[in-house]
Image (cartoon, rainbow, N blue to C red):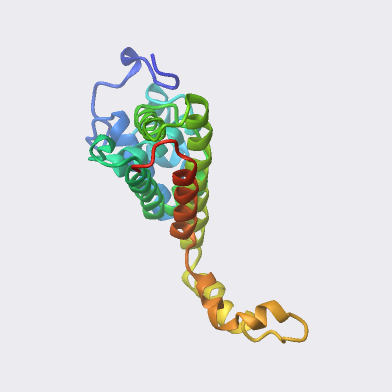
Amino acid sequence: MVEGRIPEERRRRKPTKSGVLLSEDVIVDCALRLVGQHGPDALSVRRLGAALGCDPSALYRYFHNTDDLLLAVADRIIGETTRGFEPDTMAWRDGLRELALRIHRGYREHPRVAALAAYRVTRRVHEFRAVDAGIGLLRRAGFSDEDAVRHYSAFVDTVLGHAALDAAHLALPVERRAADDRAWEGVYAGLSAETHPQLAAVRGHLPLMAGSSFEAALDLLLSALAAAAPTRDG
């Protein structure tokens, strides 16, 4: 049995009071919706039970606790974003880039979940497949097994770190997000050359700081991997 999974015999087989037939997918759907609407505090068995029309204790037939559910939610996002991803049909560098863009996009689409789960290890089927694909692409680049694992760790941490950072920015209230973005062309660009000569020298480019640096960081990382790869057809 995969770690974290509840045995089949413990699962509910009759509808809830609201007519919903409980399943792992139904509970994960509800958790995604509630966290997206109300934030991390919505991930409680009480609120989930109320939303699903069932006794909160019924959820324990499917998940050990809310952390177990959170990992299932994170794995759902990985599954949604990697659906249709076929790394064997593309060059290894292109495959890594597409995988990175998919994962980053998935967490940006669920920013409140990203703040909770982007740094977690789900130990579930969709993450297994994503990690297997990523390491496979790096082995195809000619890296040794040890280096493939080491480089994949750096790759995925870069992707998930940026996903969490960008998602946290998106989760801010609109007015706070706008104020942070304006700071680069306002407060920073207005600093004196006498006190901050380097910032003053590049003041015309400071608005670039307002956008996500994810793709720039990804390109730098992929270029470094390509330069180090034993195989040159990436």
Examine the rendered structure and indicate whether residue 229 appears above or below residue 220: above
107 or 213: nearer the viewer:
213
Can you say whether 131 is above or below 185 in the image? above
Tell me residue 54's x, y (percent): 34, 33
Closer to the camera, 27 or 19? 27
Residue 10 lies in quadrant:
top left
Vertical position of residue 166 compared to residue 177: above or below: above
Q: Which residue is at the front of the view, 228 or 175?
A: 228
Residue 227: % across, % down: 47, 46
Q: Viewed as shown, does residue 16 lie left or right of 127?
A: left
**Residue 84: image x %, image y %?**
22, 40
Taking the image as drawn, is residue 111 in sight?
yes
Extreme-right residue of the structure: 195
Horizontal side of residue 52 vs 161, given as left or right:
left
On the picture, is 113 further left or further right than 203?
left
Residue drawn at (44%, 34%) of the image: 71
- Number of numbered labels in the structure image: 0
The answer to whether residue 51 is visible is no
Q: Position of residue 176 (x, y in %)?
A: 54, 71
**The C terminus appears in which quarter of the rendering?**
top left
Residue drawn at (47%, 57%), measured in percent from left and top? 214
The answer to which of 44 and 55 lies nearer the viewer is 44
Q: Which residue is drawn at the image coordinates 44% and 22% (left, top)?
A: 4
Q: In which quarter of the image is the N terminus?
A: top left
> Is 218 located above or below residue 203 in the figure?
above
